[in-house]
Image (cartoon, rainbow, N blue to C red):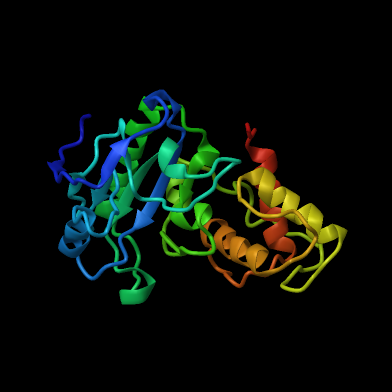
Amino acid sequence: MTLPFIDWPTPNQDARPEPADEINVLVLHYTGMTSAREALERMRDPVFKVSAHWCIDEDGQLYRLVPEELRAWHAGLSYWRQRHLVNDISIGIELVNPGHEFGYRPFPGAQMDVLIALSNEILARYDIPPANVVGHSDIAPERKQDPGELFDWARLARAGIGIWPHGPGEPTGSAPALKKGARGDGVRAFQKNLFDFGYGLYVDGHYGEESEAIVRAFQRHFRQARIDGIADGATRAILEHLLKQTAFSA
């Protein structure tokens, strides 16, 4: 570890059920609280049973809460790429930000600089595929919104962290929009693409609340200018583009 950090130990941790070399997901969060101090105190309070491996303040100050070989309690009920309980196989990083409830705002440059440096060190330690660098909203789309539509996923991808729909402008598509209440083979095919990408949902041909929530999560990550839960042609084209861009494993 080359980055300077402050140790902020927490009792909210336990042993991983699998060896540390099974770590293959990096999950990014925002704290969603009014201050860094409040968030840090919450993550070491045994009453709340929440924590993360790392926390980065808006000024770039880095805190280590849980050693990476141990399991931090950051993901909760979660799913990604056919794996439940993502805490078991992930590293969790909290970014200090008040979140949607307390005045959501862009993530400062100093914070992003440290995140990129830390993420690169983590990726050097573990075999984490680009498609497994995700937000909390990706792995728990019906519960969470973080790190949200103001988070600069594109900058991370340019730094070699995660994936982004590269190309000349935003992909466009002529497929009809799918929205809540739609049914049929077109919905089923789109759901299958979401599932293959990593999201956990029933591929049943019914565009219900679950599909809508997952599309919102996808848009928060990959189409941040439009977050309405409607799978219009461009949203569907972006998903197809990402599926082609990255070779996914089970």
Q: Is residue 159 visible?
A: no
Q: Nearer the viewer, residue 96 or 222?
A: 96
- As drawn, is 167 to the left or to the right of 146? right
User: How far across and down, in percent of the image, does residue 87 sit?
Assistant: 41, 43
Q: Residue furthest front?
A: 47
- Residue shown at 29%/54% (left/top)? 50
Q: Is residue 163 above or below residue 120?
A: below
Q: Give the image quarter of residue 227.
A: bottom right
Residue at 19 percent across and 61 percent down: it is 36
Give the quadrant of residue 223.
bottom right
Q: Residue 83 appears at what percent x and percent y?
A: 55, 40
- Nearest to the observer: residue 239 or residue 185: 185
Residue at left 73%, top 55%? Answer: 191
In the drawing, does residue 229 fall left or right of residue 220?
right
Residue 4 picture location, percent across and down? 15, 38
Vertical comparison of 165 with 219: above or below: above
Residue drawn at point x = 59 percent, y = 41 percent: 81
Of residue 12 and residue 38, the one placed in the foreground of this image is 12
Which quadrant does the N terminus fall into? top left
Quadrant that contains the C terminus: top right
Q: Residue 169: horizontal and vertical position, in percent? A: 63, 55
